[in-house]
Amino acid sequence: MIHSLSDCQAYIPESTNVWQFCVILPNAQIGENCNICSHCLIENDVKIGNNCTIKCGVQLWDGITLEDNVCIGANVTFTNDRYPRAKNAEWKLEKTLIKKGASIGAGSTILCGITIGENAMIGVGSVVTKDVPAGELWFGNPARFIRKL
């Protein structure tokens, strides 16, 4: 189901729901059985696996990959440029990988160029500035290891 008030220029599988006021650019890759909630933007060089949930107000910029079964909470902020400047001819894309089964709590900020490991969990409102190993809970600003899951 694609809501009539969304602008989906990419192929969207029938099993995936896209709610109102979403923009999905033509080269984005969207998996089966996903739920993309309202007010999301997904750029061209984005890969979303199967069974992912992307809550309201998330922007997935070029260079971001979500593997299968990833949950992204509301208003999570991703980046893809470590040193942003307007009209920067030396701009360098830094890719971010969120591995299978990982969950990112609402309102978190994810620095570009990192990997969040399989089944890892990021607590609400965290600022993640470095790689997070598989199966760990991280929380805080900056996010730090709390415990194994």
Image (cartoon, rainbow, N blue to C red):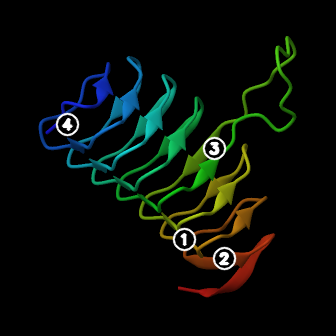
Q: Earlier in the sequence, mark 1 or mark 3?
A: 3
Q: Earlier in the sequence, mark 2 or mark 3?
A: 3
Q: Earlier in the sequence, mark 2 or mark 1?
A: 1
On the image, numbered disc 2 is attached to which residue?
138
Residue 81 vs residue 102: left or right? right
Q: CA distance from mark 1 to mark 4?
A: 31 Å
Q: CA distance from mark 2 to mark 4?
A: 35 Å
- Residue displayed at 77% across by 34% down: 81
Q: Earlier in the sequence, mark 3 or mark 4?
A: 4
Q: CA distance from mark 1 to mark 3?
A: 15 Å
- Residue displayed at 25% across by 31% down: 5
Q: CA distance from mark 2 to mark 1?
A: 8 Å
Q: Nearer the viewer, mark 3 or mark 4?
A: 4
**Mark number for residue 96?**
3
Q: Secondary structure at mark 3?
A: strand
Identify residue type, mark 3: Thr
